[in-house]
Amino acid sequence: MSDPFRLPTKPEGVIPSLIERFNSGKVEAMMDLYAPEAVFIAKDGRTITDRTEIAAQFQRDISLGLPLKANVRHVFVSGDTAQIVVDWSIDGKGPDGEDVHLGGSASDIVRRGADGFWRYIIDNNQGTAVRQPA
């Protein structure tokens, strides 16, 4: 069976691919968009390098059953590296009926691999937000 999710061939394709993968509810599809050495910056400012822990972060948000929405503000490219500045949100009623309001302005770094596809190397979904000490 072929993978229904295509990896982006341009940095501008990263966020549409992220939205599609997140909204599919498939954590493994999300992880394919991340380079093996990728880091995820947690809300509290911790740098997460363990892929299992990164996947758990995604699973937590995906399990809310709400769609990810995003608006790309800027894509800055230098060779095989790009910075993407994006406003994102996850809003609605969670599985417990409570209101959910997650979001921020991300400052992410992606890189084109030897295979020509762009993947996250740094996912900083809170951008420059002030974080609590780890």
Image (spheres, rainbow, N blue to C red):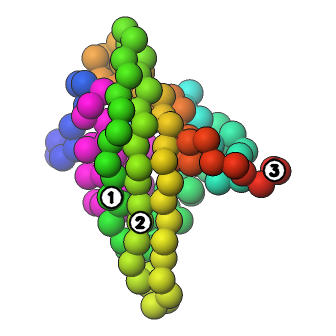
Q: Which amino acid, mark 1? A: Lys
**Circle 3 SS class:** loop
Disc 3 and disc 1 in contact, CB within 8 angstroms = no
Does 114 lie within the magenta span? no
Report the magenta residues as a range: 11-32
Q: Earlier in the sequence, mark 3 or mark 1?
A: 1
Q: How far apart are the two marked residues, 1 and 2, measured between alpha carbons?
A: 6 Å
Main secondary structure along the magenta-highlighted residues? helix
Q: Image height check: is 109 above or below 79?
A: below
Q: Image height check: is 104 above or below 121?
A: below
Q: Position of residue 101 (x, y in %)?
A: 48, 71
Q: Which amino acid, mark 3? A: Ala
Q: Would you name the residue on which mark 2 appears?
A: 90
Q: Earlier in the sequence, mark 1 or mark 2?
A: 1
Q: Tell me: 111 left or right of 116.
A: right
**Circle 1 SS class:** strand
Between 43 and 76, the residue placed more toward the observer is 76
Q: Which amino acid, mark 2? A: Ile
Q: Earlier in the sequence, mark 3 or mark 2?
A: 2
Rendered image: mark on residue 134? 3
Between 127 and 14, the residue placed more toward the observer is 127
Q: Position of residue 48 (x, y in %)?
A: 66, 42
Q: Would you name the residue on which mark 1 appears?
A: 69
Residue at 59% x, 35% y: name it: 39
Does 18 lie within the magenta span? yes
Disc 1 and disc 2 in contact, CB within 8 angstroms = yes
Q: How far apart are the two marked residues, 3 and 2, measured between alpha carbons?
A: 24 Å
Q: Position of residue 50 (x, y in %)?
A: 64, 41
**Circle 2 SS class:** strand
> Can the viewer see residue 29?
no
Q: Tell me: 23 left or right of 83.
A: left
Between 11 and 116, the residue placed more toward the observer is 11
